């Protein structure tokens, strides 16, 4: 194969990749721009001036329901899901390093939780609560629904994290007389820390953006993704894009924070 | 010694008990309710097969499944080709590791953002007075705005591909980057062309990633009700979006029976894929 044909493949692949990235980000960029639409502008171009009218409209107008409350509920759920996901997945990941009787069943349960259509799992959870006689509430049944989404992902990430972890560190700690808890606290967790940040990132963002599983489980008070989903059918102003920009900005801030933390740790270690 | 043996069980206990409580029991609940009766107001725990009879005798069921499978196959095909091509480029054509990671992250960042917003962001692009139609008319490519772009099957599949290709890229990239360069060198030394290497070395060694990505895409498309409702403008239905009507009218037993059927279908797909590839063994490798 001559170098010129290899060059051709390379340029084809580069263009393909660039097009894909444009496909991935283009539409999002468009709505970020349109969310700064002027007060009399519509859902599409042209821009009729530039303003932050639609952002202030979001939180001052009563047309959009309780967006502030929905946002704070989503943030609280995100943090709670994150905390539970990190702890449960850390230990489950450690357990899964050995094949033990029943580990296959747990793995399949996690896969089931991942692939089951979200709204149907929500239906089951909601009905279960109803039959047992517990009221649906965003922080109880809602949290349960979110965990069914974050826990399987957390375990898959833990597999990847533990692939690169050398168990000899733990053995060395135990040989030096450390107890189980000391080994965990002083050796295992510090080494795995960047990986645990990655699990946290998944735990928070997947919960924060979760909609189908929440729909039939949150009860009377909606989370932000449900409010946004409702807005897609009854809001016909750029306020819809403004809430999109706000929620994406929160996601980007969390992603940036997680990456920054991982980079700082890696740098300190180097 | 007994401490050694019970340790993995203790470690897995919180994870397992939470999952049993929030996934195992709710699915069992659905299964139970699907055999119950209702009058639209209340559930009656009397055993009946009526809910299933209704599903299996309704012509609608088959057409809904066919429609959903059509969406699934189309999305699977596009996301697989795109995901594989992008991963192939990243792993074998981007030489600097730093650059490779940066570009990979660029592909994955939207995964951590809202799917509803990413879906909605197609509206100003595809609409009748949207960017595409305005631009295409501007340069004289078309006379009339193309109306099939938005609120159509085209828009539904486009949105699925946009939302779910990430789920292909990540596992395929992961499998590909584990391929040792020496394997490829050996194949080339033995006289294989780049194309031979792709077909006979890279694709077989990437099958775990392809399998895992396919599981995600199948599950996400088959379970969707929201994209199909919004992006088809209410003109198309999938299995779940049709079920949503039963749920809204409080006909839970019927909805539960449909849910059980769909869950069984999705799990069967996943099981078939996992029969071909031992995903757990590969993940732990």
Image (spheres, grey):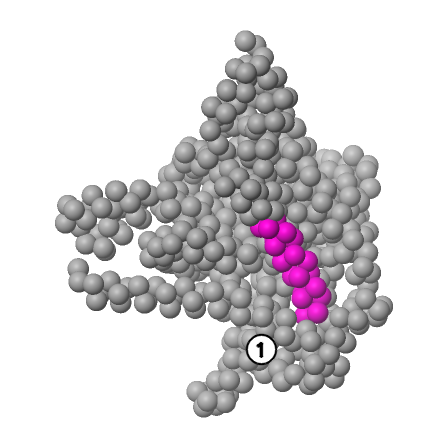
- Residue shown at the point (74%, 35%) measured from the top left: B45
Foreground of the two, A224 or A52: A52
Q: How many numbered discs?
A: 1
Q: Pointer 1: residues within 10 angstroms few (<14), some, or many (20+)?
A: many
Q: Position of residue B162 (x, y in %)?
A: 51, 62
Observer-nearest of A12 and B17:
A12
**Magenta run includes residue A247:** yes
Is residue A120 shown above or below B123? above
Viewer-side residue, B34 vs A178? A178
The magenta span reads A240-260
Rendered residue at 68%/70% (across/down): A241
Q: Quadrant of residue A28?
A: bottom right
Q: Residue furthest top?
A: B1
- In the image, what residue occupies the spot 74% across and 60% down? A227
Host chain of mark 1: B
Across and down, in percent, residue B49 comes to: 62, 39
For label 1, the residue is B127
Task: Let me know if residue B193 appears in the view.
Answer: yes
Asked whether residue B267 appears in the rendered view, the answer is: no
Most extreme residue toward the left is B191
Q: Element type at marker 1?
A: loop
Residue B255 appears at what percent x and percent y? 66, 48
For the N terminus of chain A, the image quarter is: bottom left
């Amino acid at each position: 194969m001559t170098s010129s044909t290899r060059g051709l493949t390379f340029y084809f692949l580069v263009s393909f990749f660039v097009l894909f990235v444009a496909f991935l980000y283009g539409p999002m960029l468009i709505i970020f721009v349109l969310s700064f639409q002027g007060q009399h502008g519509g859902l599409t171009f042209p821009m009729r001036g530039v303003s932050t009218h639609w952002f202030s409209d979001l939180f001052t107008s009563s047309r959009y329901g309780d967006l502030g409350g929905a946002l704070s509920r989503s943030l609280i759920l995100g943090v709670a899901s994150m905390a539970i996901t990190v702890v449960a997945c850390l230990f489950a990941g450690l357990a899964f390093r050995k094949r033990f009787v029943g580990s296959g069943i747990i793995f399949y349960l996690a896969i089931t939780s991942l692939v089951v259509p979200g709204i149907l799992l929500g239906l089951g959870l909601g009905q279960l609560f109803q039959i047992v006689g517990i009221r649906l509430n965003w922080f109880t049944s809602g949290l349960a629904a979110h965990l069914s989404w974050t826990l399987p992902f957390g375990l898959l990430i833990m597999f990847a994290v533990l692939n690169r972890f050398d168990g000899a560190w733990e053995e060395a700690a135990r040989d030096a007389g450390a107890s189980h808890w000391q080994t965990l606290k002083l050796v295992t967790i510090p080494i795995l820390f960047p990986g645990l940040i990655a699990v946290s990132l998944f735990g928070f963002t997947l919960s924060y953006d979760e909609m189908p599983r929440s729909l039939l489980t949150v009860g009377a008070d909606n989370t932000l993704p449900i409010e946004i989903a409702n807005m897609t059918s009854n809001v016909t102003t750029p306020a819809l894009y403004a809430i999109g920009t706000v929620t994406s900005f929160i996601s980007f801030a969390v992603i940036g924070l997680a990456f920054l933390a991982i980079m700082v740790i890696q740098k300190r270690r180097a | 010694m007994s401490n050694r043996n019970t340790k993995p069980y203790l470690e897995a206990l919180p994870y397992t008990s939470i999952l049993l409580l929030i996934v195992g029991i709710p699915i069992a609940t659905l299964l139970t309710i699907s055999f119950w009766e209702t009058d639209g107001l209340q559930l009656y725990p009397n055993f009946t097969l009526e809910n299933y009879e209704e599903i299996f005798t309704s012509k609608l069921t088959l057409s809904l499944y066919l429609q959903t499978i059509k969406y699934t196959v189309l999305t699977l095909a596009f996301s697989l080709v795109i995901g594989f091509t992008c991963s192939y480029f990243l792993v074998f054509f981007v030489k600097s590791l730093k650059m490779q990671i940066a570009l990979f992250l660029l592909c994955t960042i939207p995964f951590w953002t809202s799917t509803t917003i990413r879906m909605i962001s197609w509206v100003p692009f595809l609409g009748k007075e949207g960017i595409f139609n305005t631009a295409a008319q501007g340069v004289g490519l078309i006379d009339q705005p193309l109306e099939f772009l938005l609120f159509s099957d085209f828009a539904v599949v486009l949105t699925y591909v946009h939302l779910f290709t990430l789920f292909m890229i990540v596992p395929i990239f992961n499998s590909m980057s584990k391929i040792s360069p020496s394997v490829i060198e050996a194949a080339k030394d033995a006289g294989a062309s780049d194309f031979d290497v792709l077909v006979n070395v890279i694709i077989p060694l990437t099958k775990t990633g392809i399998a895992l990505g396919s599981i995600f895409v199948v599950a996400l498309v088959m379970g969707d009700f929201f994209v199909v409702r919004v992006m088809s403008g209410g003109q198309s239905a999938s299995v779940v979006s049709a079920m949503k009507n039963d749920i809204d009218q409080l006909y839970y037993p019927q909805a539960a029976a449909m849910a059980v059927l769909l869950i069984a279908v999705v799990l069967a797909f996943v099981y078939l894929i996992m029969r071909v590839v031992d995903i757990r063994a590969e993940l732990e490798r």
